[in-house]
Amino acid sequence: MHNVSRPLRTGLVAAATLAVAAAATAGSALSASARELTPARHQANTAEWWLPALGSTGAWRLAPGEGKGVIVAVLSTGVDASHPDLAGTVTTGPDFAKTGRRPGSAYWADEGTAVASLIAGHGHGVDGADGITGIAPGARILSVQVTLEYNDPLDSDATITGRLPAAIAAGIRYAVAHGAGVIALPLDPGTLSPAGDVNPVAAAGRRAERAAVAYAISRDVLLVAPAGDNGGDNDAVNYPADYPGVIAVGATARDGALAPFTNTGSYVALTAPGASGPSLVPGPDAAVAGPPVGLTVAAPDGGYQALASTDMSAALTAGVAALIRGRYPWLTTAEVTEAIEHGATAPVSASSGSTKTGSATTAGRGHGALNAANALIRAAVIAAAHPRPTPTPTPTAKTAPAPAQPTATSPVATAGAATAKPDGAAGTIRSVLLDLLVAVCVLIAGLICALAVTWLRRRARSAKAAEAARDGRGRSPGRHSRDQPPTAPPVQPWADAGWPRNPPRAAIGAGSAWTSATPGARPDLYRTGDAPLPPWEQAPSVFASAPVPKAPPPWPLSSTGPMYVWNPAATTGPLHAVEQDENQNR
């Protein structure tokens, strides 16, 4: 990486005009939520020549969210989150490099702050007209420190640089775990030793780094890496750019030519602006090319500097990936990669004008030059062929009807059509509150019904009690209306016998189903005068002198129990036999 005129300026003052464009929709199909997603258009200041070159205005029109909702992880040397162009955009993660470079020290956050500003810088001042505007100003940055600056003296210590591949691997996994949709990778200085040979200390870290790259791709995270700045030296392969699935980006100058330092290996997928062009050394050696002029980027001291590197090219590509992921979040990593690479402007051979790649003049260019507007159009075509999957509603959740979508007649119209923002969590909360309200109403109604039934039952019992009191049914059984006072027993025939008599039991009142068995209750059953008396009614002296009767036959079981009445007039039964025996003995 080439560092010139740092700091270039404390502030960049440029005339900026904001053009406000509304997303085209049909009538009322555009909801208030969709209109809120349509931001003001940015007009790049004259120092940011790469934004018009990439077709940023068209890209922002096709992706009105400008990367909103997308997290881009910047794995680098750290990011100055307090810079005015990045304030409120950066989340700082851990320092996996463990090199001692921290905020406020030298060799910290030059590259990281520059990359973050090219991706998601939002400028500052009135309407953000001053400072750096990134290609995806709506995106957020996750900063993870994993490497060293290219001019850091620690780069010559193979022991320290040998630990960096493992640090990059840890940073990749951390970014995936914290929701990154795009990861901007750094150049790995631990891959090679200072002599250009493979660093043996980094062998284990390389394996971890490769596994982490595969892990991120399996989690549908897009990885972008600089192709390398060693094109003017040995053009050796750089990592993690050469890992399968990583988009490796080379650098071009303002005139579209390859930067003199960019790596031209076969793993380069496409190119993007990484330098303004070569500068001429003043004086008699004016024809000798000096250090290239870099892109104006944010610096960690709150100012700006010019940096030339394939890191800047990879940052712009990561920003375009954020635009696509923000506009079409359901597209896979492979589909976003296809949109970026196939949307690139194909390289042209200087000799024949052919766009065929593989010639000496197109080597190191891959699919061609990054074109943000074409990438969004290509993404719209892919999205039309693979529309957003309809989420399966949960059994307990109430789903709102899908908002009407405008009909597009071209990929550009499809890309620029604004979609209504679904209710999401707000609709679910309303549904739950309505369910709770219905449940409370049902409970209250049930309580009212229970109280009404209880009151009616008590009222019925009170009415029955009052009626019983009126009819006398509530009095004691001795005063029951069907009971009659007992009648006085008649004078018994044995009253003249002169021996004491037992007082008779009171006769049961009239109307009873039973007939009293007490002597006197039925006078017709007893004889008077010469009629014989039953043995138990005779005087003791008579009963004692009476002959002993023969044993009577067994008595039949009585159906009347103790209430049985002896009838001397009966002509059958065991008592009649006893009476005959007594007559014979007389």
Image (cartoon, rainbow, N blue to C red):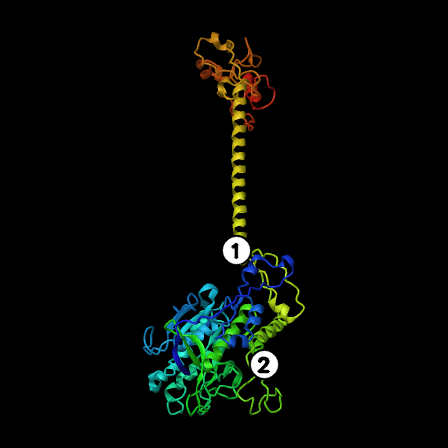
Image coords of residue 443 (percent x, y): 52, 43
Q: Quadrant of residue 212?
A: bottom left
Give the answer, above or below, for where 194 lies relative to 423.
Answer: below
Image coordinates of residue 442 in percent, x first then y, are 54, 43
Comparing 313 with 493, the one in front is 313
Q: Is residue 421 visible?
A: no
Which mark, residue 342? none
Q: Amino acid at mark 2?
A: Thr
Pick whichever, 482 or 555, lies toward us.
482
Check the image and report above or below for 416 versus 502. Answer: below
Q: Nearer the viewer, residue 72 or 132?
A: 132
Q: Earlier in the sequence, mark 1 or mark 2?
A: 2
**Outermost residue, front side:** 283
Percent x, y of residue 125: 44, 65
Q: Is residue 300 visible?
A: yes
* Quadrant of res 566: top right
Query: Could you say where residue 523 lies in the image, as x and y percent from the top left?
Result: 56, 12
**Of helix, strand and loop, which one carries label 1?**
helix
Q: Secondary structure at mark 2?
A: loop
For the residues labelled 1 and 2, the Cα–Cα distance comes to 43 Å
For label 2, the crowd category at 10 Å Cα-Cα, with few meaning under 14, some 14 to 19 and many 20 or more, is some
- Mark 1, mark 2: which one is toward the viewer? 2
For badge 1, the amino acid type reads: Ala
Are discs 1 and 2 less than 8 Å apart at CB?
no
- For disc 1, the neighbor class at 10 Å (few under 14, some 14 to 19, many from 20) is few
Quadrant in the rendering for residue 531: top right
Of the 4 image quadrants, the one containing the N terminus is bottom left
Quickly name the residue at label 1: 426
Check disc 2 and report the residue beneath it.
345
